[in-house]
Image: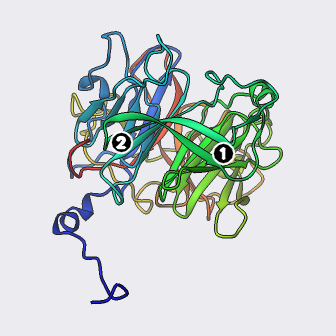
Amino acid sequence: MSSRTRIRIPCRFYIQRLHLLPVSLGGIFVGLGHEPAPPVFFARPSTTGPKISARLEGYVAMPSPIDIPTILDCCNGLLLLDGRVVNPATRQWVSLPPCPALPAPVRGFGCHDACLAFDPTVSPHYEVLLIDSYLCYTTLDEGSEWPPSTFMVPVYSSKTRAWETKPFVREGGAAGTIADVRSAEVPAHRHTAYRRETLYVHCKGDYVMRITLSDSKYQVIKLPAGINASVYDEIYLGRSKKGVYCAVADNNNDDEKRLQVLFLDELGDRIEWIVKYEIDLEAHLYRNRDCIINRPWRLQDDNQHEDCSQGVTAGYDLLWDSDDDNLIDIQDTGEKYRCGYISIFGFHPFKEVVFLCTWDDRVMACHLKSSKIQDLGQVKTEYHGDVIDIAFVYTPYRVGELC
């Protein structure tokens, strides 16, 4: 058989477990702020499928008894904590060795942006990258360009079980000078996306770092003019149905709440952002606040096997079907629903849907093509003084051992 006609046949092990790859939405991990509290898991109860062990504090050993699990990143079924990688679908977790590139007595990942890169369709192994977005560890002067032409990044590989400082060579221009980046507003939250062995990192300075792990190169992709952390405090980078997206919520105007969704076009010679959707949220969220709405999602408590606030059997694999949940199809009559502050919870990984959270902790699914809204439920936490800080959309992964 010639090399042109050679066919690669997947192994039986892979075929038998193909249905276990992360192809369904499990729920949303919600990080809490104000007072120290572990993350909670917001999802739709189901009576079928293996449970997701959402209470990380119940089985993940932290360095100190007073340490609380804090999610830093999430990628294809794995969670990254400070010094830990966890698979909630299998209750497996591993402790990462200290990074030798960080100066003592820095604990965990220091002030780096810790990013998780994992694609089980390519490899069972994952990598953790530490990006110096805050410029805490650079020795370059203020007039130097940033990021540098060769960016040294500490990388942990589960394959070698060791850290290595790798050089990534920049293609194209820099984001600006070190002085520019230092003076830039810090986004409230900076998220990552991982797709086709490429990591996208939202960095301080209103740019995205596009890192290709296969050839150790990176590019700087600036956000469109006018979209910056000094104006918008809700900017969410994520992966969805067709690629990499960026959602921007405008909370500056009390009379109008708009959602803008950008798509990163990578097909041509030039990588650029295009505005794909613009939605008037107040018009589409308007409804009678006293009407009874079926809200199928709840906080899950896998220790008690019941919903912590509603008393509903839970703790299982939680699938989301947009045809089953309550749908609010509102015609624009000119009336507005005063929804207050809008937080972005993330993108549905397989549908063009953005998850939003209103001022009263109601989670909504916004279908981008139709602008239809689904009221999924309310995040009611059991910890006093909690405020929602950050969210990660979670897809369960149940194949193999955690390396």
Between residue 173 and residue 351, name the one nearer to us: 173
Alpha carbons under labels 1 and 2: distance apart: 22 Å
Q: Earlier in the sequence, mark 1 or mark 2?
A: 2
Q: Quadrant of the N terminus?
A: bottom left
Mark 1, residue position:
208
Q: Which quadrant of the figure has residue 266? A: bottom right
Q: Residue at x 48, y 14 (%)?
A: 106
Q: Residue at x 53, y 37 (%)?
A: 362
Q: Position of residue 371 (x, y in %)?
A: 63, 59
In the image, residue 16 sits, relative to residue 106, either above or below, namely: below
Q: Position of residue 18 (x, y in %)?
A: 26, 64
Q: Residue at x 64, y 41 (%)?
A: 150
Q: Residue at x 61, y 49 (%)?
A: 218
Which residue type does callout 2 highlight?
A: Leu
Q: Quadrant of the C terminus?
A: top left
In the image, residue 94 sits, relative to residue 22, either above or below, namely: above
